[in-house]
Every structure is written in C-alpha cells, then in structure tokens.
C-alpha cells in the first residue's frame, strides 16, 4: 500500500505505524463534569466501519510526522492524506 505523504510524496506503508481512529485527535476536556465517562469512551470505545474511515498513521521510518489517512476499509484504497496538525487545527484544536 502506498501512502502519498503531503510533504514527502508517495511512501510505502511499511514506513508507517497505524495508530487507530483519527477521532483520537478530539481528546475530551479533562475538566468537564463528565470527564470520567468522556475519557472512558475516548479510550475504549471504537467504531469498526466498513467503507471510508479516517485513521492516524505515524511516519516512524521517516520524518516522524502524524498523518490522517482516509482509507476505504473494504478495498484499502486511500482517498486522502493530510497532516494531523492541519486536521486538528481545522477541528478547532490549537495545540
């Protein structure tokens, strides 16, 4: 599988480590009244979709960047690759 890195171009998937659902970017507020339940859901509950899915990948054998890869879980076709920092900023996270 080839991942088209936004900065480095096409790279073999063996250079990367899959880290899970991209919703991990949306870490809950630890100061909220429902923090315990929110963190339980954040840490342990995951969807297992068939079809398009956003995933976190880490470029371990390269520039050590984090990517959000949109991949079809049925065909393994990759339709989009973005830097995770750009996705996080678009979702309203400043850090």
Image: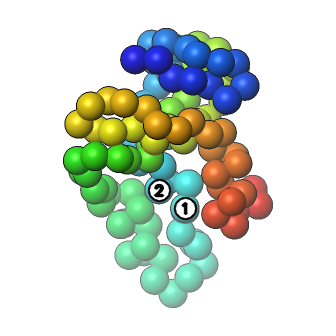
Question: Which residue is painted at 46% across and 83% down in the image?
Answer: 34
50 is higher (above) or lower (below) than 9 = below
Left or right of 50: which side holds 38? right
Q: What label does residue 23 carry, if any?
A: 2
Q: Position of residue 39 (x, y in %)?
A: 44, 67
Image quadrant in which you'd find residue 43: bottom left
State whether residue 19 appears in this view.
no
Question: Which residue is painted at 61% across and 35% down in the image?
Answer: 66
Q: Position of residue 63 (x, y in %)?
A: 69, 20
Looking at the image, which is closer to me, 53 or 17? 53
- The residue tagged 1 is 26
Cα–Cα span, label 2 and label 1 = 5 Å
Left or right of 32: which side holds 95? right
Q: What SS does tag 2 mark?
A: helix
How many callouts does the rendering have? 2
State whether residue 30 appears in this view.
yes
Q: Position of residue 29 (x, y in %)?
A: 58, 73
43 is higher (above) or lower (below) than 1 = below
Question: Which residue is painted at 62% across and 40% down in the image?
Answer: 82
Bin the neighbour count of mark 1 within 10 Å (Cα to Cα): few under 14, some 14-19, many 20 and up: few
Question: Is the C-beta separation of discs 2 and 1 under 8 Å?
Answer: yes
Left or right of 69: which side holds 52? left
Question: Which residue is painted at 64% across and 63% down in the image?
Answer: 91
32 is higher (above) or lower (below) than 43 = below
Looking at the image, which is closer to me, 68 or 95? 68
Q: How is the image coloured?
A: rainbow
Q: Furthest-right residue in view?
A: 94
Q: What SS does tag 1 mark?
A: loop
Bin the neighbour count of mark 2 within 10 Å (Cα to Cα): few under 14, some 14-19, many 20 and up: some
Q: Position of residue 73 (x, y in %)?
A: 28, 38
Quadrant in which the C terminus is drawn: bottom right
């Amino acid at each position: 599988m080839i991942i088209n890195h936004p900065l480095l171009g096409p790279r073999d998937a063996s250079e990367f480590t899959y880290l899970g659902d991209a919703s991990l970017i949306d870490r809950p507020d630890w100061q909220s009244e429902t923090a315990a339940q929110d963190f339980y859901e954040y840490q342990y509950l995951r969807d297992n979709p068939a079809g398009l899915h956003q995933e976190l990948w880490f470029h371990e054998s390269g520039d050590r960047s984090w990517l959000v890869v949109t991949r079809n879980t049925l065909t393994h076709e990759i339709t989009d690759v973005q830097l995770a920092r750009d996705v996080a900023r678009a979702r309203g996270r400043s850090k």
